[in-house]
């Protein structure tokens, strides 16, 4: 757990480097200094980067493209600012909090702490994500907010699942599940609050 911030930093750096390397190493791609977005888009027919340059920017760009492609989008309800606030919380939760784990029998208890925006993110996201994961199983989760963060208790039905929870740690448990993307789209559509 003590090396988690270093591991996360390496993963982020690698994720940013791979698309950039692909673009730079393409034989017909030439970097453009200065100019407008239109100038850059109009430059040649060579390879262009697929990454939006920053994960929150890329996530919002993907949602905007989905909204524009859907003729049923009700633009009077769309609220990208709510989605952006949630993405800020996701970033704060992953990069600005600390988490320690205590194992007791078939249960792992994560003590999560943060300050300022990170504390707000913990209070907003940990109980909500625990409820989502409870609905999908196989673990039983309980979230309790505290003045300095939260305690997330994860009880596993089998020794194998317990090992999985221990291996994932708090940050892996928070990233688990496929509810994030539909949740983001619903937020942007104005169908749910942050």
Image: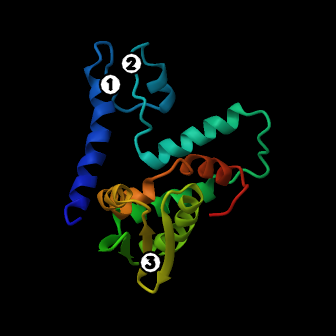
**In this picture, is 45 found above or below 40?**
above
Residue found at x 23% / y 53%: 7
Q: Quadrant of residue 173?
A: bottom left
Name which of mark 3 and mark 2 comes first in the sequence: 2
Left or right of residue 187, residue 42 in this image? left
Give x and y (percent) for residue 160: 34, 55
Q: CA distance from mark 2 to mark 1?
A: 6 Å
Give x and y (percent) for residue 30: 31, 20
Q: Which residue is mark 2?
A: 47
Q: Are marks 3 and 1 in contact (CB under 8 Å)?
A: no
Nearest-to-viewer mark from 3 and 1: 3
Give x and y (percent) for residue 137: 53, 57
Q: Residues within 10 Å of mark 1 (few under 14, many from 20)?
A: some
Is 104 or 58 nearer to us in this picture? 104
Q: Which residue is mark 3?
A: 150
Element assignment for label 1: helix
Is 129 or 92 nearer to us in this picture? 129
- The quarter of the image holding the C terminus is bottom right
Name which of mark 3 and mark 1 comes first in the sequence: 1
Q: Which residue is mark 1?
A: 23
Nearest-to-viewer mark from 3 and 2: 3
**In this picture, is 22 found above or below 189?**
above
- The quarter of the image holding the N terminus is bottom left
Element assignment for label 3: strand
Q: Residue furthest front?
A: 158
Q: Residues within 10 Å of mark 3 (few under 14, many from 20)?
A: many
Residue found at x 37% / y 74%: 109
Element assignment for label 2: loop
Q: Which mark is residue 117?
A: none
Q: CA distance from mark 3 to mark 2?
A: 46 Å
The colour scheme is rainbow
Q: Are marks 2 and 1 in contact (CB under 8 Å)?
A: yes
């Amino acid at each position: 757990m003590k090396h988690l911030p270093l591991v996360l930093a390496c993963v982020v750096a690698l994720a940013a480097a791979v698309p950039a390397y692909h673009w730079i190493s393409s034989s017909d791609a030439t970097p453009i200094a200065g100019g407008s977005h239109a100038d850059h888009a109009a430059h040649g027919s060579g390879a262009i980067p697929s990454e939006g340059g920053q994960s929150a920017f890329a996530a919002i760009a993907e949602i905007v493209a989905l909204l524009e492609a859907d003729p049923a989008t009700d633009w009077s309800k769309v609220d990208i600012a709510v989605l952006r606030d949630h993405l800020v919380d996701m970033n704060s939760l992953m990069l600005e909090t600390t988490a320690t784990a205590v194992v007791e029998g078939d249960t792992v208890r994560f003590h999560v702490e943060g300050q300022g925006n990170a504390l707000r993110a913990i209070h907003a996201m940990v109980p909500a994500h625990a409820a989502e994961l409870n609905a999908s199983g196989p673990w039983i989760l309980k979230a309790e907010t505290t003045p300095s963060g939260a305690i997330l208790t994860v009880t596993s039905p089998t020794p194998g699942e317990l090992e999985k929870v221990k291996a994932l740690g708090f940050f892996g448990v928070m990233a688990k599940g496929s509810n994030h993307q539909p949740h983001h789209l619903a937020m942007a559509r104005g169908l749910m609050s942050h």
